[in-house]
Image (cartoon, rainbow, N blue to C red):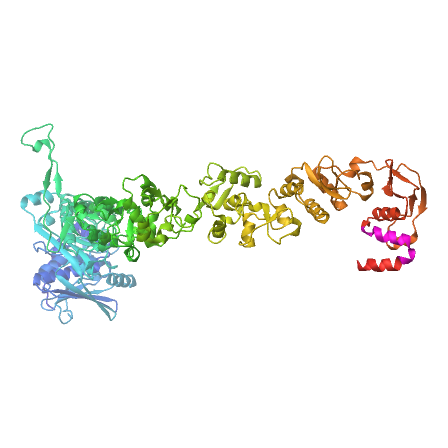
Amino acid sequence: MTDTFGTDRTRAAVLAAWTASTARFREDANAEEDFALGGYRDRLIVELAQNAADAALRAGVPGVLRLTLRDDVLTAANTGAPLDATGVEGLSTLRVSGKRDEAGAAGRFGVGFAAVVSVCDEPSIGSRETGAARWSRAETAAVVASVPELAAELGSRGGHVPLLRLPFEAEPLDVPEGFDTLVRLPLRDAASVAAVRRMLAETSPALLLGMPALTSIEIDLDGSERRVTADGWQLVSESGEFAPDEVAALFADRPTEERARPYWSLRWAVRVADTEPAPLPAGVPPVVHAPTPSDEPLDLPALLIASFPMATDRRHVAKGPLTDFLVERAADAYVRLLGELPRTPKLLDLVPALMGKGELDARIRRAILQRLPATPLLPALSAPAPAVQTPSFAEAEVYEPDAEWQVEHPAREPHEDGWLVAGQEAAVVAGSGDLLAAIADFVPGLLPAGWPARHPAMASLGVRRVELAEVVDLLSGEAVEAREPSWWRSLYEVLPADDPESLGALPVPLADGRLVRGPRGTLILDLGGTRLASARDGLDLTPLGLRIVHPDAAHAALLRLGAAEATPRTILEDPITKAAVAQSLDSADSEPVAKAVLSLVEAASLVPGEAPWLAELALRGSDGDLYAAGELMLADGALAGLLEPDTHLGVVAPELVETYGSRVLEAVGVLDGFAVAHDSDVLLDHDDCDHDLDGEDDWLDHVLDLLPELDLPPVVPDFAAVRDLELVADWPAALALLTRPPLRAALHPLRVEGVEVPSYTAWWLANHPVLDGRRPRELRLPGADPLLQGLYGDAPGGLDPVALGMLGVRTTLAELLAGHGGPEELLDLMADESIEVDRAQLRALWIALAAVEPARVAPPSRVRAVLGGDIVVAAADDAVVVEAPDLLQLVTDRPLVLAPYDLAESLSELLDLPLAGELAQGEVTSGGETRPVPPEVRSLLPTAPETYVEHEKLLVDGVACTWRFFEGSVHCTGLDGLARGLAWATGQWNDRLAVAALLHDPTAVPLLLAEADLS
């Protein structure tokens, strides 16, 4: 075995130093232990990679490291410069590196190899060309124990020795083919094996990024292989050498070994996937690498490898001017890195937030954020706004206290691939690409689509977020005045549909050349073009003053924002059109308005009455004067032949009929037949219900009389009334029109608050002589209820019974009495001496009247009654209502109101007439003899009394009578009187004649019973 590297001399020198000073031995042992258990305890793989990178750098070859773990032995084979004596010396010393003059070397402190001590007691290293060296804890301990001066110290340390201070010669190692050097590490125990396995699993591309000389790391873990490379990363590197004055300023607080290496370097690396920045892989620790991983957190999606000065623990960056310098350089390089990455929205993920996870992290972030807002990084669809500066007075050549001026710097030219702007020059609008392309000319520095407006990085970069409402405000001035209507349509095409509030002030070009703010109130000509295209040629809507959208700008988006589709109907319903119609009669030139409106009505196919407000349209009459359309008639129309001459209505000009036809003129209110006033939700009071109808106030009073008392005026939902009835001269022809649809509908009664009341039209007709000179309510239907015979005349023929009924012609007694005022009207007719009423009819009328509520009738002054067998009309003061047949004999000298006795009280109350019992006491004043009632009577009257009182001459109130039922007894003077008294007493008045016959001939009982059975 040849001692190629002079390990004997090294051991002798170290032992001599230890022997001369046991403190030196103790210092070396403590230092190695500190490094192995402290700063380098988990850095084994990092330090092996670092040595491999430095070997490749010295040899100028691509560095490859193969790490193999088998049978609890870790080997590390690498390419590059072989092991030499200087290298062995460096590995066997602490804090003395043999690489201090090698620019770019990863190892620079001379302590990295101490990491092997944490897992191994017998490390060895060898190169194929130069030989091998080894270290041994056991052999070192034996050598130290053999030196008397050190034996006691070794004992006090429990046998612990500095493993790496004494190298030994070694047999050549079996270096794998293709590699130059091999490190062999038999692992100490299971814990060491587990630690190494973990470190191998955590090995990531970060190692290679921090050591450019190392191209790949091959890992063989018990036969399972993987290869680690640094592919797919975007890199930016900076480096330099300090001048002597810079070394003096920046390294004043650094050790001599570091001052001897006046170099600096840094590298930023960002993972790139599919040409876009991506997050750091899971295996890459988010820490600062200096150049190996430190414990300084760096919470950025990028890897920083920089030659930061390290504290004595080799795990944290030392504070000081050198660190300050490198922080600034790192910020510069990071900004350059962002500038070299693809300009996609993913770039925003690399913009740091302000808060960091550590002091160094925060300092780097602040430095980056100071630079980013002014750095052109973002692509833009439009040029940035010109930079404007206001110089201070100090910059003026002549001091002028009142001077104010601005200097505008021209905008820079675009790059080959478009505009590139700084964040503080940029603006972002949330919207589609088509929208942004449309508005780019109005928003300086506008970012393309896909750049999220609410990304936190936007605020860090100083990007101005422009809301859609602001964009709408920017669409003003000279920039838009020259825009063609088709350009506006293309803008509407790409506007978002979910934010109508922001688009409320959107400019809209009109057909008359104006540009107005806000779609609401504008009209879009029918997008299909079919309706208005069918109107006659030369249609000019300008006289109406409408805000019609230019046809080339029309788009459905405007409808969503409040515009209305300008079909002929919507144009007619527009408030501006209605105002033009209302003012047309007072207009200096009403003809263009009339022409436009009539053309629209024609195109809209309006029917008469559909738009009643059109009746105010000014039209020319045949006499040359202007009339409201509702006051004109068609010359050959039905109405013109019905009216009296010289009415206020005119005849429409024949040229209008020729041009537009009668259908269009009727639709605007020109009268062919009767005009109908239509209204809705009409309040039935004299202020609101005013339709300029003849007798409308009287009708209203009549209706209100029919209704119960209400706190508020009632409402009629749908009101329709025929106009101009008072102008009719030819009533037969007029009634033929009024009783046919559609005018017939105006005759139907209204239902108000649950009460049926007559319509205005029906009420007016019922109260005017329209049927052969007589009012309809004075007539009855021919062949109708015979009880009305003689009371009403027969209505003329020619109209159907239902129509006559709606006009007020009487149909039945029941309908008459149910109607308002019907009972009083019947009483008045019955009191008319010119009208003949027979006795049967009179009795039926009184029966019907008895069912009427007295509150509906004012007591009459004269009544139809019976006096001495004759039907007469008598003063009500003389008449009496008979409620019992035995009282008839006492009031024969008075007019009698006769009806079934059970209705007497109702009639008395209805007519306010006395009952017979109220005028006569009915007291029996004569004497008689009590006799038994013949038993055969009970066959007809089962409840007949046992006895009766027979009088030779019965006197009641001094008047001779045939019978009286008084105080529970029947008084009579003969068999007929007895029969009547018994029938009344038992409540079987209708059987009185049968009882009389029985009393006269008792043998007739079987026959009488049989007849009773048949009744």
Query: What x and y, as percent, mark residue 657?
Result: 33, 51
Q: Which residue shows up at 33% across the image and 48% down it? A: 572
Residue 157 visible in the picture: no
State yes or no: residue 999 in magenta: yes
Query: What x and y, as percent, mark residue 226?
Result: 22, 67
| Left or right: residue 657 compared with residue 675 | left
Q: Pick whichever, 537 or 314, lies toward us.
A: 537
Query: What x and y, as percent, mark residue 14?
Result: 13, 55
| Left or right: residue 907 compared with residue 666 | right
| Left or right: residue 356 compared with residue 4 | right
Q: Pick whichever, 732 or 829, lies toward us.
A: 732
Is 618 drawn above or below residue 46 in the view shown?
Answer: above
Is 146 drawn above or below residue 413 in the view shown?
Answer: below
Residue 392 visible in the picture: yes
| Left or right: residue 233 compared with residue 743 | left
Is 892 drawn above or below residue 531 in the view shown?
Answer: above
Q: Pick whichever, 709 or 333, lies toward us.
A: 709
Q: Which residue shows up at 18% across the image and 43% down it? A: 477
Magenta span:
990-1004
